[in-house]
Amino acid sequence: MKAAFYTLGCKVNQYETQIMEQSLRDAGFEIVPPEDPADVFIVNSCTVTAESDRKTRQMLRRMKKRNPAAIAVLCGCYVQAAPEKAAAIAEADIIAGVRDRGDIAKLILQSMREKERLTHVPSFEQGELFEPMQARGLEGHTRAFVKIEDGCRNFCTYCIIPFSRGPVRSKPPEEITAELATLREQGYAEAVLVGINLSAYGSDLGRTLADAVDAAGRVGLARIRLGSLSPLAVTDEFITRAARCPSLCPHFHLSLQSGCVDTLARMNRRYTPDAFADTVHRLRSAFPDCSITTDIIAGFPGETEEEFAQTLDFVKQIGFSQAHVFPYSRRDGTRAAAMDGQVPKNIRERRAHALISLCTRTQQAFRQRFVGRRVPVLFEQRAENGLWEGLTPQYVPVFVQADEDLHGAIRNVYMEEIQAAGCLGRL
């Protein structure tokens, strides 16, 4: 039997897809690309924005039309946050939330036996522990995602995720070490530590994120990379301990959302632009040439032209090496959805376009500093143009011409020029 996955959303979802793939392989399924015919297809959903919800529904219906006799599984954050809406999607044969990912094969086999629609969306319980799971990586990849934290209780006013992911649960450090050791033995060169609110790691265990970095650094993987962080998590102690980990990539994704102090307050973000800038300064002092990437929301309720101009100025001041820019998406069930001053769609999109244009310039300026230098690159695949594609520790895409198989290799590359997609270099 064949199974296909389509994953939307964050790196945590990608990790959980790894877990589900393993469950199905262990049950005798062959995993095929989502465009191939399959006996079972699984849509692992995201619910960060209304657009994510729309894509989830669209993809489920598209895959069902392509495979009308297949069992359709809808799982993930969309289901957990809105189980009634998910249940109303007639194309879904199995409705599953974000719990018990390793048991997905059992649900599918049960559905095949009983030929009935199944729903499995258990709620969260206070004090529950991190769900035991250990990934063996995504086939064909050189980087593996390792989920070390789940849940969030920050309740940013625009975000629905706390309702879909429950309280903070952290993977014990010894389990992080064990999982990474397995990945190293399987030939992975890089692991990305991810979480729903990675900065909260350890708050339920009397630990901190620095403990997770220490645990990861003991394994001997060539590279350890961190997922998205709150600037509040980047304390002096964290920086000191992180700097002692030689395999930690100098790439820090700090979620900004806005460069205006009043907008941040309406978002219920617990830092100011000045505090964010101080965090960036301390990171750049400890990690020269580090990459600072971010997320920004354009057109949040109440955002005036003056407030947006403050964000533009702040983004220019920081000089991000990459930014994910999103027009604000109104989410039912969040406080922001009921706020006065909803910004019209055309203005949100105009502001997002302006931010994207600015961040493209700061990205190119960051990449330009590597031209004429030798940098280590972890290669993953051949690009469509026939060149080998890889990433520097700073998450800069690099392309080289090579006849040899570079998959999974870390090689020094002389950076020659900047192009739109990344840097062109030679071995």
Image (cartoon, rainbow, N blue to C red):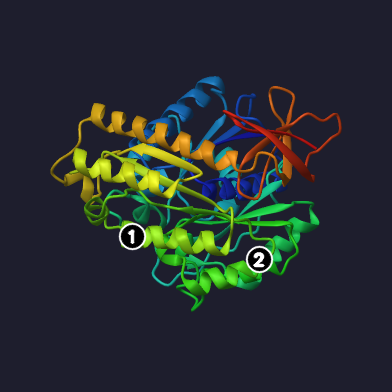
Q: Position of residue 195 (x, y in %)?
A: 50, 57
Secondary structure at badge 1 equals helix
* Residue most extreme to the front: 372
Label of residue 274 in the image: 1
Which is nearer the eye, 62 or 281? 281
| Image point (17%, 45%), residue name | 338
The residue positioned farthest toward the right in the image shown: 404
* Quadrant, the N terminus: top right
Residue 82 falls in image quadrant: top left
Q: Look at the image and tell me whether residue 147 can be seen.
A: yes
Eye-nearest disc, 1 or 2: 1
Label located before the other in sequence (1 or 2): 2
Q: Residue at x 39, y 70 (%)?
A: 126
Callout 1 amino acid: Asp
Compared to residue 112, the image places residue 103 above or below, namely below
Question: Percent from the top left, x then y, of residue 163?
Answer: 34, 54
- Give the residue at mark 2: 216
- The answer to whether residue 124 is visible is no
